[in-house]
Image: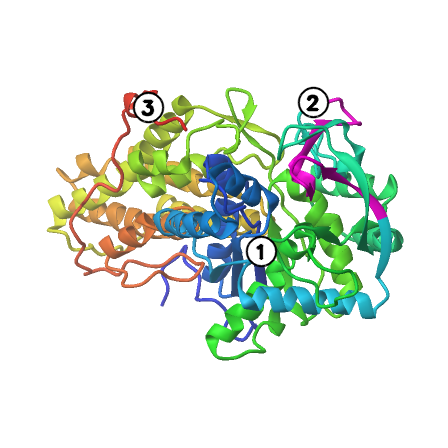
Amino acid sequence: MLRAGTIAALDTSVSPRKILVAVGWPYAQGSLHLGHIAGAYLPADIFARYHRAAGNDVLMVSGSDAHGTPITVRADEEGVSPQDIVDRYHPEFLGYWRDLGIAFDLFTRTDTPNHHRVGQEFFMKLLENGYLYKQKSEQYYDSEAEQFLPDRYVEGTCPHCGYEHARGDQCDNCGRTLDSTDLINPISKRSGSTPVLRETEHYNWKLSAFEDRLLEWLNTKKGWRPHVINFAKGMIEDGLIDRAFTRDISWGIALPVDDLGEGKRIYVWWEAVMGYYSAAQEWAQIQGDPDAWKAWWTNPEAESYYFVGKDNVPFHAVFWPALLMGHGGLNLPTDVPANQFVTFKGQKASKSRGVGRPLSWYLDKLEPDALRYALAATLPETSDSDLTEDELVRRINDELVAAWGNLVNRVVSMTHRYFDGVVPSAEGLDAQDRALLDTIQMGIADTGAEIEAAHLKAGLAKAMSLAHAANGYLTVREPWKTAKTDMERTGVTLSVALDAIAGIAVALAPYLPFTSPRVLEMLGIPQEPHWHPPVVPAGTKLGPAVPLFAKVDLELLDSPDDEG
């Protein structure tokens, strides 16, 4: 019989939901920083971990974008091949996920034979459906380098906002997507010269044909973040233009047709977002069931969530849905919970411009769950968040260590001190005891509801409010005092507190995957339970009271070294 304040295990008669968690593909041309983690990777992992705990079937995929022109730019600067750059940074990314506990089902790369095959098949499907057509156009050519210039090889002034360092594909200042020929005063990054326009022939994509369908689809979406839905609708209402689907470049996916001549590749903008689709197929092949991916892509009941930064909103809320419509038979995004930017002293974090320390710097100095907690508490979900070392340290020391770590340590320590580490009986619960257990039960449900809605910062606040409730309960009950006069009452208090801690550990597990299992192990719970509060049975022998987190000295993060 379950104790008051607990709930039964999940209803196994309900079929698990199919949840695709698709995470933005980082260019494999430089180290990542905290802005990347807070923007896409940590939110996606929290969301996926919750759904796994809730009993749903999650497929979380992403990979290194191996074909982006930032990679070829870096390769040119270093005098090496693009493959050398990708081979350097892809393993680094895998190390980040391991050290931070980002639990991908597959983190692959876009230079695999599988991705090339899927990209070419996608091209042919669009061609067969009448959404690709050949057209001659003018493209910038560098006469000194004797080559056509990919968009990112051209920089100039944005025609919309006047930003003087806009790229040929997108303006980082106003967020608009561009064509290199839109730029004012263009300059070739290859030679520093002024490029000239030359005629070339490419396949164009009939993006303009999807305006009405996209708006109709977006109008059905409820609960999307305002900056995502408003930007996407505004972009479509301004009018979508057909876009070049191929580029004059030697690095990327070759065309499956040969009617344009040599030196043509599928534009990375389009084949990179196809990576979610190709990664699911690669994962299925690894499982030994090549059709397993269909449960997430062709099943109309499946859900798909795309975690990206706000600069990727056009690609995931407009371009990718249009490509999926053009292909046919594949699920459109359920939600695109794009985060805003993390800034450092008012500047957008940028690995290319050296704004913000690299992620490895923080991983060397902070425990992974401490870093995850501090970032999750300040996620830029609805507005840019400025990050300071002071705030990181305050979050870790004043909240994580003082409120949660200390709660666990002192309750387990008192149980060892007063009851030799054996969980006492909890007979005769009164209203205050039940109130705490009910608060934990409802708090776990509330935390789950916030995570379901991709309100991850609010979910963490809900979970931490449970720790504050448990601390308040102890302050009122004072087991360190009642141990001198009423051991039965002391036993009930500590037993209830241990149950509360077990429930809080469940609520915090998506955020703190390293220490939450340690808490449950300390309480004698052999495995991480599903999304409900577990009971710590009377008579359980507790593990030793080991501190979960170390307090952080601000001076550790205040040093000016290694700011690269």
Q: Nearer the N terminus, badge 3 or badge 2?
A: 2
Q: Quadrant of the N terminus?
A: bottom left
Residue at x 53%, y 43% (from the top left corner): 456
Question: Residue 429 at what x, y percent from top left?
Answer: 32, 51
Q: CA distance from mark 3 to mark 2?
A: 31 Å
The residue under label 1 is 22
Residue 151 falls inside the magenta stretch = yes
Label 2: element kind = loop
Q: Image check: 269 left or right of 551?
A: right
Q: CA distance from mark 1 to mark 3?
A: 35 Å
Q: How many marks?
A: 3
Residue at x 28%, y 25% (from the top left corner): 556
What's the magenta region? 137-163
Q: Quadrant of the C terminus?
A: top left
What amino acid is labelled 3 in the image?
Asp
Q: Which mark is residue 561?
A: 3
Residue at x 63%, y 46% (from the top left corner): 337
